Image: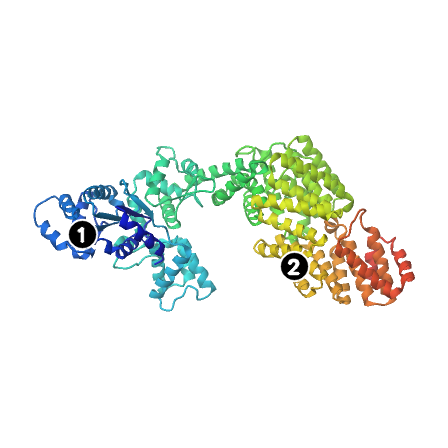
Amino acid sequence: MGRESDLADLGEELPGARLITLLGPGGAGKTRLSQEAAERVSDAWPDGVWLAELAPVDDPEAVPEAVLTALGGRETVMRGAGAEELRAAERGAGEPLARLTEHCSGRRMLLLLDNCEHLVEAAAALADHLLARCPGLTVLATSREPLGVPGEFVRPVDPLPDPTALRLLADRGAAALPGFRVDADEETAAACAEICRRLDGLPLAIELAAARLRMLTPRQIADRLDDRFRLLTSGSRTVLPRQQTLRAVVDWSWDLLDEDERTALRRLSVFSGGCTLAAAEAICADLPGGAYDVAAALGSLVDKSLVVAAPGADGGMRYRLLETVGEYASERLDEAGERDSVARQHLTFYRELARTTDPELRGAGQLAALDLFQREYENLRSALRHAVAARDEQEALSMVLSLAWYWQMRDLRGDALQWSEAAAALGPDPFAPPAAPAPSLVERCTDAPPPMGPELLQEARRQVALVRMASLDHAMDVWANEAGMARLRTIAATYRAGQPQTCRSPGSLWLFAVVLTGETTDLRGLLDESVRAARDLGQEWDLAAALQMRANVLANRPDWAAAALADSDESLEIVRRLGDDWGTAEALSARGEASEKRGDHGRAAEDYHAAIGYAEKLGARAQVLVLRTRYASALIELGRGAEGEAILREVLVEGRHVGHEGTAFARFFLAMWLGSSGRTVEAREQLGVLHDDFRSASIGVFEAFVLGGMAWLDNQEGLYADALARGREALAQADDRLSQMVAPQMHLLHLVTVARALGGLGGEHRAALAARLLAAGQALLPDGHVPTSTERANFAAAEELARGVLGDAAYETAYAEGAGLSQEEATALVEAHRE
């Protein structure tokens, strides 16, 4: 079942071939495929198709006689004549090979040699001998390794692809349990897919699993596959004993290996996701006390279908074990008592790979380094897992710090959080009060392999804690309590601006703690000091990163936008010279944000579009989503709303599995555009989803944006009372120091929304208050603020409503009264106005 393509190919190849070997692991279905293929083309051999089963034969010298017996036995003939003639000849004297040759030499026949792997040299010698002397003979062999005969055509029999494996499970499952369906419900479908995947698509293993459906559900079977060799027993009684259980199938292959091959196979089980030859040689090499040729053993295991070899993305060969073989080999590794020593070699190798590859992420070798991290990511996680399990703090710290920037570039916050927490738990908390001030350290924690000295070890602990803190940026409630704020203050006080370690990642994350406290009065001064120190240290990439960070902060304020442009330009020049595509995308994005604040949406769109190209080149999905959102927003401001809307909708679809951080602003901008273009029902739906996301994730600083957007939408629909209530709430959310630091103009824009609601509700008192709020909001905006199209329309609507109630003269009088109000006074007026 499911081999139609293989059968068709064999049907074309067999009539013109002399020797074809079906090659594959145990349980792949080689025997069944060979017999079905032979049946389909039997008419091409007038003297018959004959099956010689070699599995019961244990003496290489007995192979010719076993084949001779098969050709003379009725139970082994598949189709053809001549058996009686051969039995008559056998009654005479003669050596088996000679009699076999004589019998086949004048005939046109197909001989199936099944299960050659344990007698591969004898089977090869026989095939070579017969093919040279019997011109009408074709041999179709099945084996777990090639025969190695000249002219042999090797056809791999791969595990079944997922859809085919699922059909096989459905068929065999229905035979074992009438009425069984793999798609009976969602849980069953998921469990059946997992069974087929974890059993590597091996037909025999799937059939054994199907037999278990008489007593277990698919989910129960899937959950027990970690112990598959106990689970998958009791196969068909009509097959050979070695095919009645999954363990027997793999035992058969193991027993055929020499000691070097067994050593290599069991040690290969320590890898996850495959390995390169260099990794295999480093990790599978003999431990003190002996030596063997790992490459030769690996090649032999590939030939014997126990190791899968395939070209990797880098052009080199990559080697992996099927999951079933890997589990078996892992058991053998434990039995040999080598688990700890081999896992230690694996940890050392991949710690060094991570440590030495990490710097390549910051220059022209960036794409190759990203690809390498991605190819080896499962091995890197396995190494981390071993370091944590062994409670080796220094190894775990080194690996977390070496992977931190890769996690940032790939937006793998979940992994960053998981492993930074696990590594941090292995040692003391570096920020437990009273935390000592951090000394200035020029050396990086990963400049050399462990062990680290005392000062560097403590710094590594601090930096891993910073990685954890940054990975929690979507869960602000962690810090929105007394204990959380106390910890942030401790972190902020431990470092000082300008220290070498705070000028580079991940030490630069210290500034994130400073911002979260909301207590700094001179954020720009801290950023200036970081840039100065990075410049003095002479590390160009670190300087570019410091400039980008300062540009991103400065771009939040229109009066600092010119300085943000200068920083992003300098950063862009550096990263382009270094060949850093990620940095180029970030610098272009920073420049785009600064341009938007200055009202230059055309230049912003150009920069965002260029940045998207760099991010796409790196496969940075999360970065691409953010950049496309910013690009769409700029297009909307340029009057290209349909284009912008289409992009925002694409971002929401593509970012569905990324999480709300990747799509939140796309949803917000889409909602505002929909509301502006009269589609308020869908706009409200989008804001509702966004509000639920932010509320469940406790991202307090962004909730003010959403509440303000909902209040604005209420105004759009004429729901002025609702708009007033939500506007008050938005003002309260925007009143904390963090919100004012991140978006200082947000509070003032909410005043305009509240003023519009008051004007809409009518009454001279409300309209006069609205005029005062409009004046206060305009007067308090930072110098150089260029309103967006939505802001302009919102202000115009609010002004029209208030003027309509008061008349021009009274409006101007009230407006003049509000021009001198402070932000706190304007907010107090809103709070004082209760209906």
Q: Position of residue 290 (x, y in %)?
A: 35, 33
Nearer to me, 793 or 496: 793
Does the rendering let one see residue 257?
yes
Q: Sequence order check: which comes first, mark 2 or mark 1?
A: 1
Give the labeled residue for mark 2. Answer: 690
Q: Is residue 770 left or right of residue 248?
A: right
Instruction: Give the residue type that dot 1 points to.
Output: Ala
Q: Tell me how many marks there are.
A: 2
Residue 437 seen from this side? no
Residue type, mark 2 in image: Leu
- Identify the residue at horizontal 61%, vertical 41% (top origin): 582
Vertical comparison of 222 with 542: above or below: below
**Tags 2 and 1 in contact by the CB under 8 Å rule?**
no
Whole-percent x, y for residue 268 in the image: 39, 42
What residue sits right under mark 1 in the picture?
A: 70
Q: Is residue 480 left or right of residue 358?
A: right
**Residue 280 x, y percent position in the rendering:** 41, 38
The residue closer to the viewer here, 692 or 816, is: 816
620 sits to left or right of 775: left
Q: Secondary structure at mark 1?
A: helix
Against 432, residue 78 (above or below) is below
Question: Farthest residue in the bottom direction?
Answer: 179
Which of the 4 image quadrants contains residue 566? top right
The picture places residue 313, in percent across and down from the top left corner, at 47, 42
Q: Secondary structure at mark 2?
A: helix
Q: Residues within 10 Å of mark 1 (few under 14, many from 20)?
A: some
The vertical placement of 489 against 291, above or below, is: below
Foreground residue, 163 or 479? 163
Mark 2 or mark 1, which is nearer to you?
A: 1
Q: Name the disc covering residue 298, or none.
A: none
Residue drawn at point x = 47 percent, y = 37 percent: 348
Q: Assign the N terminus to one quadrant of the image.
A: bottom left
